[in-house]
Structure formats: structure tokens, C-alpha cells
Amino acid sequence: MLTNIKQRVERAFSPLGDAIAATGLKPNHITVLGFALNASSVALLAWTGSLPSFLAVFTLASLMDVLDGYVARKTGRVSAFGAFLDSTLDRVSDTLTSFALMLVGVASAYETIFLVLGEYLVSYTRARAESLGVKMAGIGIAERAERLLLKFSVFFAILIGASIVARAVLWVLILVTYITVLQRVAHAYRSLTRATRRE
């Protein structure tokens, strides 16, 4: 599902991506900028408690996360290290934004830890399966784009005072995260056992 969402967002913001590409800014710089914005948004939330300010910076950071890949392809600067850097910083950003759910009071410490563990398992199951030759792109109902949208929905619900909705969406987020882990484990199992039978 992630691929379809990212493609739609890329098409919508392609003029901005083209403008950024024209400046000569490297994709890795955009990746680092997006991470810095994510970290800054959570720091801003922790320091000021301003949810509107956090959401504004968080949204901009999420946009950078989409545009770095677009600019890389547009300028012919797709690289293995760029993919590695993007994935690594995404994991840190995911942890920070999950921590922000606790900062706004919608998630307990235990729920936050449970969510972060699930997000890391989503990433690890893909990385490990792909290292064994299994194609994992698009596997799972809640890849990073879906989880970001759900997190944004939680924060927005808190902003408008819909705390019950926020709690419900939080648990949808946790549930679909672990469903994604199970889907990836199942896909890896099917692919690897088929490969073993052919040997």
C-alpha cells in the first residue's frame, strides 16, 4: 500500500520536487533535513507543548520524506547508501513520533514501547527477508506511509479535542502495525519454503 500512497503524493508535489531538484540540493541532504525537522518537531512539542506547531513541522518533515526519493530519481542520484541512510533515519524518526504520542497524553509508556517494537519489527522483517532474496515491497497493510497518516490522525484528533477518537485510532495503529508484521512473516515463510522445495 505504501507504494501507491507515495506515488500519489509524489505526483501531487512533483512541481515542488522539480523546484528542489533544480537547486542542486542532493537527495541525502533532503533526507537529513527531513530527519532534522522530525526531531525538531518532537523537541518543540516537548519544550512548548504546542500541538499546532508540532503538526506543522511534522507535516513538512513527512513531505521531505517523500521528496528525497523523487529528487533522487529525477536527478539520477539514486544510490545504495541513500536508501540505507533513509531507512536508518526513518527508524529514528518513527521512534520520536511514537514518543510524541506519549507526550500529548494519548499513549501510555507501555503502549508507546509496544508500538515502537512493532514498528521495528515491520522494518526488520522486510530487511531480513530481502537479505534472503524475498521481495517484500508492498507487503502488509500498514507500511510507513499508512502509519504516518494514522499518527497524524491521532494528533489531529487530540488537537480538536476528540480524545476518544484519538485513543481508537491509536489502537488501530498498533493493531495494523502488528498485522503487517504477521503478513510479512507469512509472506517470507511461503517464499522461503517454496525456494527450499525447489532446491
Image (cartoon, rainbow, N blue to C red):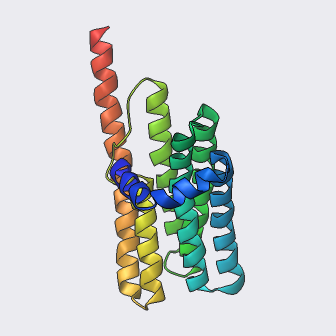
Residue 103 percent across, percent down from the top left: 60, 78
Above/below status of 36 relative to 118: below
Question: In the image, what residue occupies the spot 38% across and 39% down?
Answer: 137
Up/down of 72 relative to 179, above or below: above
Q: Position of residue 153 (x, y in %)?
A: 41, 75
Say whether residue 86 is visible: yes
In depth, the one of 122 and 145 nearer the eye is 145
Image height check: is 25 above or below 106? above
Q: Which residue appears at 45% of the width and 54% of the height?
A: 144
Where residue 25 appears, x then y in whole percent?
67, 51
Q: Quadrant of the C terminus?
A: top left
User: Looking at this view, is 60 or 2 the one in front?
Assistant: 60
Quarter of the image for residue 165 reads bottom left
Q: Residue at x 49, y 53 (%)?
A: 119
Residue at horizontal 50%, vertical 75%?
107
Residue toward you, 85 or 126 = 85
Q: Residue furthest bottom?
A: 161
Q: Position of residue 2 (x, y in %)?
A: 38, 51
Splitting the image into 4 quarters, where does residue 10 fall?
bottom left
Residue located farthest toward the top when viewing the structure as drawn: 199
Residue at the extreme right:
47
